[in-house]
Amino acid sequence: PNIAAVISFGSVIKYINNIGIEKIQKYEQELKEYAIEKLKKVKDIIIYNKNTDSGIVVFNIDKVFSQDTAVFLNRFNICVRSGNHCAKILKDEIGITNTCRASFYFYNTKEEIDKLVEVLNNPNLKDEIIESVKENHKMAMNLLVKESKILKALGENENLELSNDAALLIARISDGALRDALSILDQCAGYNEPITVNTVGNAAGLLGKDYLFEISDAL
């Protein structure tokens, strides 16, 4: 048994009880109400849960993809969750599949909410979100290219014939995680052949375009 974790969890319970669950809940609700009052004045904002009893505010900027808003806010060290939040049936209730979620707890402050509102009140918000996303995509692509070069160098050290396109595909599949990329490269090496895009596709279980076209024609 994980004895250390049980002991730690006991300390967490004592810590929460010392503060008081009722006090925490009351403060959460206070922050949520404060946030709603501030955020509803932001241009083009859509708030989906104004009247719920929780420390969560779910919102979108009209006609802006939630993940794009989250990427933009990250530039200001403001962390929100974006997506369907593991609640895929939510779209049946609110008619939207992806939202931003700001979650407040006893360690958050009204000053942090003011910062969120200040950033969202930018008169050029939508244009700056677009630029932020473009910049983020460029950064991600640069990281993938760097990882592909690392894979090429490692392949050469192991006398593997690894094409540039194959190295980049491995980097893409692994989402920039080098450990996962090395695992895929190791699987490719087991084929005992020059490592091409097709080799990577077979090792990673990717569906080829021809196969997808066959499925499309059959439908």
Image: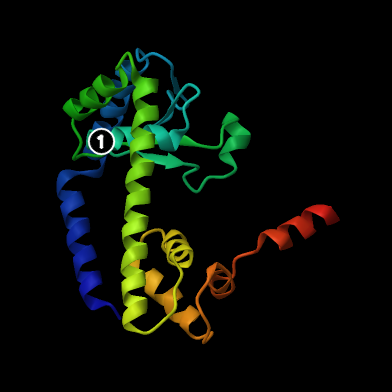
- The front one of 43 and 12 is 43
Would you say 212 lies left or right of 175 here?
right
* Secondary structure of residue under mark 1: loop
Rendered view: 207 above or below 37: below
**Residue tagged 1:** 75
Q: Is residue 107 visible?
A: yes
Q: Which residue, as the protein is rendered here, is positioned at the far right?
A: 218
The local crowd at label 1, few if under 14, some if 14 to 19, many if 20 or more residues have their Cα within 10 Å, is few
Residue type, numbered disc 1: Arg
Q: Which residue is located at x 30 percent, y 33 percent?
A: 73
Q: Position of residue 49 (x, y in %)?
A: 45, 27
Taking the image as shown, residue 59 lies to the left or right of residue 119, namely right
Q: Where is the N terminus found, in terms of image quarters?
A: bottom left
Percent across and percent down for residue 155 are 37, 77
Q: Is residue 70 visible?
A: no
Q: Residue at x 32, y 76 (%)?
A: 154
Residue 213 found in image quarter: bottom right
Whether residue 16 sits left or right of residue 91 in the image: it is: left
Name the residue nearer the viewer: 196 or 187.
196
Question: For residue 164, what is the image quadrant?
Answer: bottom left
Task: Give coordinates of residue 92: x percent, y percent.
Answer: 63, 35
